[in-house]
Amino acid sequence: MKAKILDPFTSLAASVTVLLCVALLLCTEANAATKNAPAPDFTLKGKDEANHRLSEEVGNIVIVNFWASWCGPCREELPTFESLYEEYADLGVTILGVNVDDDPEKANVLLKDISVSFPVLYDTSGDVSKLYDVSAMPTTVMIDRDGNTRLIHKGYKSGDEVRYEKALKLLLRE
């Protein structure tokens, strides 16, 4: 059996095809939240029935916390964010609790037991979770006053709130 020899044009075409595929993948990922880059904008309906748009929060420090009603660590973490919100809201800190359940009522049932005063938004389609590459529950994203992502933290264990508060205090000094 003879070995097939590719002509230079076929080889070049194959290389260009591979490069285009890689470029397409990189462009697709460019919209995901990346540390020290502009946070992807989104609009979600909140528990208060209003639409909330992230870009309207420029000038504030924003903590976006993705959570689910079925997530045990999320249940532990929500009161932590309520405490942070109560302490820092007057200093221009906003917390957006983004629930990822497919039905807002699941979140509302949990919120009867764990009361929070910060806005709770519903990502029932999962579009914003995909935009932020949420692969663990909970996932927390901290955004500076200029709208840049400064912290991405996946999961929660007791003591993580110390890390959040430290990062928050640094952002407040900027």
Image (tube, helix red, strand yellow):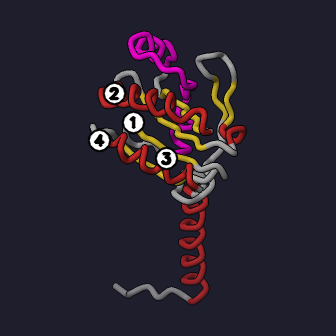
Q: Name the residue that disc number 1 marks.
A: 138
Quadrant containing the N terminus is: bottom left
Give the number of the disc on residue 168. 3
Q: Residue 144: x percent and y percent?
A: 59, 50
Task: Give the structural element (helix, strand or loop) at label 2.
Answer: loop
Judging depth in this view, the residue of 10 and 22 nearest the camera is: 22
Q: What range is drawn magenta here?
A: 103-132
Q: Name the residue that disc number 2 marks.
A: 71
- 45 relative to 4 in the view: left or right: right
Residue in the picture at 60% in, 33% down: 90
Q: Residues within 10 Å of mark 2 (few under 14, many from 20)?
A: few
Q: Amino acid at mark 3?
A: Leu
Q: Of callouts 2 and 1, which one flags the residue occurring earlier in the amino acid sequence?
A: 2
Residue in the picture at 40% in, 16% down: 114
Q: Of callouts 4 and 2, which one flags the residue occurring earlier in the amino acid sequence?
A: 2
Q: Of callouts 1 and 3, which one flags the residue occurring earlier in the amino acid sequence?
A: 1
Marks 4/1 in contact by CB < 8 Å: the verdict is: no
Marks 2/1 in contact by CB < 8 Å: the verdict is: yes
For the residues labelled 4 and 1, the Cα–Cα distance comes to: 14 Å
Which residue reaches farthest left?
Answer: 158
Marks 4/3 in contact by CB < 8 Å: the verdict is: no
For the residues labelled 4 and 3, the Cα–Cα distance comes to: 15 Å
Q: Residue 154: x percent and y percent?
A: 38, 45
Membership of 127 in magenta stretch = yes
Give the number of the disc on residue 159. 4
Task: Give the structural element (helix, strand or loop) at label 3.
Answer: helix
